Image (cartoon, helix red, strand yellow):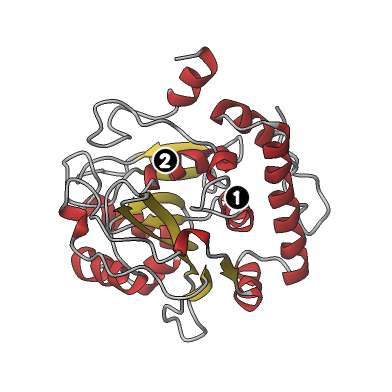
Amino acid sequence: MSGALGRWFSRFPEGWWGYHWAPPTPMSAVQLIGTPTFDSRLMATLWAVINRRRSVMLSSEAPQAGKTTALSALVDFLPDDTTGIFVRGWWEEYDWLDEIPAGTGYLLINEMSDHLPIYVWGRAARGALMLAGKGWGMGATMHADSLPEALDALRGQLGATDEDLAGITIYLQYSAYLTPAGMYRRVEEAWHLRLDEAGGLAPVRLGAIAGDRSPSLTGAQRLPAPPMLPDDGGRAARPFEHDPAAYAVLAASLGTGADAFEAELAGRAGFLEQLADLGVCDPPAVAAAVRSYPSPQPPDGTSTERSD
């Protein structure tokens, strides 16, 4: 493993890659938008959200969807002064809360489930969701076949409240399965979770693939490999359709105007596409390039450009 790639891998603790005997081949954000899984606008949205240390949840019912691979790439989008907190197991005490300045910590959870002892569930998962609801950033993955199924699990098994769940700014719904033509992996829906004026959870769908979603795979999380389906119904080639009205709601939640947010997303998406055109694709190179990108200006005009 090269020195640069070795340093990139060293950010993650033992067990981050779950049950794999060896870490899978990593992918950068630029490489991911070169696959059907993400388009550049959705990746730019994740960059804008994570750069503000807001929370994201990546969910797939079936294994091997690429959730941890994507979450690992998203770490590149965190501000330089972020302290990453890798939560593991069921009994995290969260005794570090007084040691990390407010607004600088970001919880990283490779899987929120009860499948392995190193995964996060029970008391530890409940604590992470509570912190997300109180404004702590969190990047996590879980197993569910839809947003309603995920919310039912987090409410019913962990006791999460609407306030906790609204701390998950972005929820991505993957579908993953085998076909005779190869593996299908794709984010099929993206949601913004928020509270309405009455304090209830009011998710807004940011976008979805054109046409219908893949068939339900509920129960596939317990399989050793993704299930085999006859084909993907052409879904790998369908565009991901974004809802401008929903993005305006997300912009308001992030404290910015709709037009300014659209300009920010266009700039971030264009930057990632330019990196691809220049051949800047491997994880260490993309991580270095992203650090040079200016953060958005705050309302008072004070520069927040990240320094190297």
What distance separates the C-alpha of mark 2 from that of mark 1?
15 Å
Horizontal side of 278 relative to 157 (left or right) equals: right
Horizontal side of 280 relative to 42 (left or right) equals: right
Can you say whether 58 is above or below 215 in the image? above
Q: Looking at the image, do the residues carrying marks 2 and 1 touch, with CB atoms under 8 Å apart?
A: no
Between label 2 and label 1, give the one nearer the viewer: 2
Q: Residue drawn at (44%, 25%), measured in percent from left and top?
A: 9
**Residue lying farthest right?**
301
* Secondary structure of the residue carrying numbered label 1: helix
- Type of amino acid under label 1: Trp
User: From where the camera sits, is residue 283 visible?
Assistant: yes
Q: Position of residue 273 (x, y in %)?
A: 69, 45
Can you say whether 198 is above or below 83 in the image? below
Mark 1 Cα shell of 10 Å, populated few (<14), some (14-19), many (≥20): many
As drawn, the label of residue 47 is 1
Q: Position of residue 222 (x, y in %)?
A: 16, 53
Q: Position of residue 68 (x, y in %)?
A: 38, 43
Q: Earlier in the sequence, mark 2 or mark 1?
A: 1
As drawn, the label of residue 69 is 2
User: From where the camera sits, is residue 168 visible?
Assistant: no
**Which of 58/222 is in front?**
222
Q: Residue drawn at (21%, 70%), measured in percent from left and top?
A: 156
Can you say whether 143 is above or below 103 in the image? below
Can you say whether 194 is above or below 91 in the image? below
Q: Residue drawn at (40%, 38%), measured in percent from left and top?
A: 85
Mark 2 Cα shell of 10 Å, populated few (<14), some (14-19), many (≥20): many
Q: Quadrant of the C terminus?
A: top right
Q: Residue drawn at (25%, 51%), measured in percent from left and top?
A: 226
Horizontal side of 92 relative to 137 (left or right) equals: left
* Secondary structure of the residue carrying numbered label 2: helix
